[in-house]
Image (cartoon, rainbow, N blue to C red):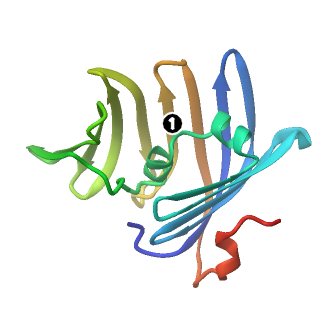
Amino acid sequence: MPAQREIVRLRWRSEADQVSVSGSGAARIAPDSLRIDMAVRLGVGRATLILTGDAVQAEPAELVQQLLPDRYALWAAFGVVRLPDSLAVVERLADGPRTFWRFADGQGRVSTFELHGDTLAGAVRTEGGRDVARLQLTRGPGGAVIRARVTDLVRGAVFEVDIVGRQPSGPFPSEIWQLRP
């Protein structure tokens, strides 16, 4: 879980099916919730994604599904390991300074997180024994994530986030965790 509340300014890029889309946005991160507001360059569109616990809200849902990785990969892109409540298997393997945590959901999906000490370094999603997604993180001198790259190995799609600013925040107003009508 994130240690503090913060507002993260970001630039993002998505490539899929020979189409590249990019833009900017902001993420509001609380210990148990994440809200991302994104704008596509040239005013093409806007999207909002809100994750509170295991609940997901998205507007417009189609654009969010098309551009963003699944919610657990999205949390991991900010350096946070979040897991679904329904896990069938949890395994831990230590290899010197690296630790691997493997979580299986009972439906053939396995997520493996690589940590260096207590810091997330990357993740791989496997389905049916085959790697289907990979997360690579780049951290700055202070240890904070400055770039995340999620690759969908099945579709050949890539979603990248460059974090261009961070600002600590106090508690967010409760309406921040709701889509506007």
Q: Is residue 143 left or right of residue 90?
A: right
Name the quarter where the C terminus is drawn. Answer: bottom right
Please, which residue is most extreme toward the right here?
A: 43
Instruction: Please tell me which residue is depicted at 34% across the width and 23% down the height of the picture.
Output: 131
Q: How many marks?
A: 1
Badge 1 amino acid:
Arg
Q: Is residue 25 left or right of residue 147?
A: right
**Rendered residue at 33%/45% (across/down):** 121
Q: Position of residue 179 (x, y in %)?
A: 73, 64
Question: Which quadrant of the figure has residue 73?
Answer: top left
- 42 relative to 117 in the view: left or right: right
Q: Which residue is mark 1?
A: 149
Most foreground residue, 167 or 18: 18
Q: Position of residue 68 (x, y in %)?
A: 60, 40
Compared to residue 9, the image places residue 96 above or below, namely above
**SS category of the residue bearing label 1:** strand
* Image spot of residue 1 (x, y percent): 38, 66
What residue lies at 66% left-to-right and 52% top-to-bottom?
A: 10
Where is residue 62? Give x, y as percent: 72, 38
Near mark 1 (Cα within 10 A), the count class, few <14, some 14-19 or many ≥20, is: many
- The image quadrant of residue 127 is top left
